[in-house]
Image: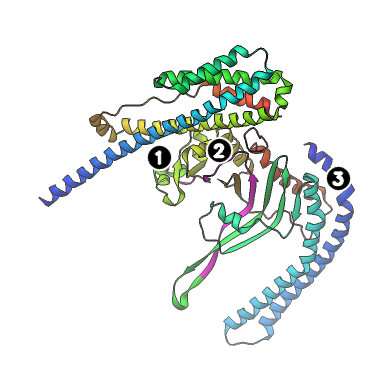
């Protein structure tokens, strides 16, 4: 790829000096983490050896507390280093990909946009995000960030109430200006029931009242991968042209992950499940490593490439 | 006795259900056809403006343009059978696609702001018509399935519903996409 070739030069010229400085900091953090880790292990050992307690529960409680304190210290020791890596390195990689892009390591896609997309119907109790990028690719305005969204689940009652947080989305949430005008809402979800249950599954889908009308499209491969709901049959097809369906299929193959799309207010919202935390630094291994840094460029190119994947820069309709 | 009544009631409910299902599907199909009509009307409204703008620049396509104008007035007047209308509409599509390709030979026209706007509106209407046709076909397929599959086919036979014809998406429409790509500068 042309971009990756020129990135080598960019890397050597703009990133290498800072990376070397940061790597020295990494070694310091490594040392701290090792010291904290070892002392925690030692402390836990001593606690079990020299403190005599009647009950095992109290002992375990103390040990757990020690471990938690150690983890807090470890994350504090690395905090500044992680932040610097994002501010100095990732932000410049973002600029390399496209100069119009703005990066905020602690920013995220607004919660209202995430819930407003209506892709997920869970109540969003916890909403975390980082690595926010915003800008314009060609004629298309985009923004995206990593998002983790959870809902609270309580089971049992009285003194046995159990509360836990269930993650219903973790990955990249991407918003782009769509190239056509539309008002109704159309939602494209990964197909679970049709894939598993075939024709009967399709019947079940049409019974999903919370989602609007089921829209059956003529591309069988697309129908197998996705299920489409919408408020307006014609408008859904106006958006999902045969060529866009092909593009979405290829896009899904490229990411090889669960992909959700929502079209609303002339915008497209895309949620891509990822179990990886992108744009992070690392410990105990040198970061003056071209392949390690280059991976971030590839992620970013993949993300900004969505504009081309979905052909959003084609502006032959009345929306400019 | 009670069992007989229950069976009779269930059969009666099934009959009502099948009947309503068929009628609903027929209405969906008719509704979808009406949508195509609305979109076509939108396109007819665009033609006079487009023709006037284009005429100033195009030297060799005058006969095609006046043909388009004629066909358009024929279509707007109404009084045509469904088949005639579809045929006429296909002809208009084909001619207009030809004009849109010919635009390439006129750089001045391609730079005309007014034309560009009309062209964008045209592309949009074309896309909407195509969407409406696909919606119609989806509705017809659903209706045809109901008419031909068991057990609703029994009811369809009784009330005399017959299989409906799908809208053939004309070849021109598929070519349009390529032509559109040409304009994309």
Q: What residue is at 42 percent from the left and 33 percent from the top?
A: B32
Query: Which badge, 2 or 3, comes first in the chain's sequence?
Result: 3
Looking at the rendered structure, the secondary structure element under dot 1 is helix
Q: Nearer the viewer, residue A64 or A93?
A: A93
Image coords of residue A264 (percent x, y): 56, 46
Q: Which residues are magenta?
A: A163-192
Dots 1 and 3: beta carbons under 8 Å? no
Q: Are marks 1 and 2 on the same chain?
A: yes
Q: Which residue is mark 1?
A: A199
Closer to the camera in the image, A35 or B182 = B182
| Res. A109 in view | yes
Q: Secondary structure at mark 3?
A: helix
Residue A239 badge: 2
- x, y percentage for residue B107? 73, 22
Query: On the same chain: label 2 and label 3?
Result: yes
Specify whether B108 is left or right of A119.
right
The subunit letter for the residue under badge 3 reads A
The answer to whether A185 is drawn above or below residue A73 in the figure is above
Magenta-drawn stretch contains A226: no
Label whose residue precedes the other's in the sequence (1 or 2): 1
Vertical position of residue A222 compared to residue A42: above or below:
above
């Amino acid at each position: 790829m042309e971009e990756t070739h020129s990135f080598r030069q960019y890397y050597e010229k703009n990133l290498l000096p800072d990376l070397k400085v940061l790597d020295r900091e990494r070694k310091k953090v490594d040392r701290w983490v090792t010291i904290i880790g070892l002392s925690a292990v030692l402390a836990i050992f001593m606690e079990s050896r020299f403190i005599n307690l009647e009950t095992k529960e109290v002992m375990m409680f103390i040990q757990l507390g020690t471990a938690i304190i150690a983890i807090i210290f470890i994350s504090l020791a690395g905090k500044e280093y992680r932040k610097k890596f994002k501010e100095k390195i990732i932000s410049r990689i973002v600029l390399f990909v496209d100069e119009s892009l703005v990066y905020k390591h602690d920013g995220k896609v607004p919660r209202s946009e995430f819930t407003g997309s209506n892709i997920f119907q869970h109540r969003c109790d916890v909403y975390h995000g980082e690595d926010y990028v915003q800008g314009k690719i060609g004629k298309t305005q985009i923004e995206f960030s990593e998002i983790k969204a959870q809902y609270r689940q309580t089971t049992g009652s009285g003194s046995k109430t159990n509360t836990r947080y269930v993650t219903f989305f973790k990955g990249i949430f991407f918003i782009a200006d769509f190239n056509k005008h539309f008002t109704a809402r159309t939602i494209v979800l990964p197909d679970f029931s049709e894939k598993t249950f075939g024709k009967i599954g399709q019947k079940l889908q049409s019974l999903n009242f919370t989602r609007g009308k089921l829209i059956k499209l003529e591309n069988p491969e697309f129908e197998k991968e996705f299920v489409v709901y919408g408020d307006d049959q014609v408008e859904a097809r106006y958006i999902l042209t045969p060529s866009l369906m092909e593009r979405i299929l290829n896009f899904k193959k490229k990411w090889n992950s669960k992909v959700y799309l929502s079209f609303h207010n002339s915008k497209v919202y895309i949620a891509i499940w990822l179990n990886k935390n992108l744009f992070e630094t690392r410990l105990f291994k040198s970061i003056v490593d071209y392949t390690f840094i280059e991976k971030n460029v590839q992620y970013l190119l993949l993300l900004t490439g969505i504009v081309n994947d979905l052909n959003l820069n084609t502006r032959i309709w009345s929306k400019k | 006795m009670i069992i007989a009544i229950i069976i009779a009631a269930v059969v009666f409910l099934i009959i009502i259900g099948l009947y309503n299902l068929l009628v609903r599907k027929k209405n969906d199909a008719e509704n979808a056809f009406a949508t195509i009509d609305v979109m076509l009307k939108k396109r007819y409204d665009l033609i006079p403006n487009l023709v006037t703008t284009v005429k100033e620049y195009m030297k060799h396509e005058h006969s095609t343009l006046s043909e388009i104008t004629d066909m358009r007035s024929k279509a707007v007047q109404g009084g045509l059978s469904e088949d005639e209308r579809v045929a006429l509409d296909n002809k208009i599509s084909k001619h207009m696609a030809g004009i849109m390709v010919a635009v390439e030979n006129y750089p001045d026209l391609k730079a005309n702001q007014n034309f560009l706007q009309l062209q964008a509106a045209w592309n949009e209407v074309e896309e909407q018509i195509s969407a409406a046709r696909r919606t119609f076909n989806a509705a017809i397929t659903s209706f045809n399935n109901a008419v031909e599959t068991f057990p609703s086919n029994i009811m369809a036979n009784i009330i005399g519903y017959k299989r409906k014809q799908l809208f053939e998406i004309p070849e021109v429409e598929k070519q349009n996409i390529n032509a559109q790509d040409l304009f994309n500068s």
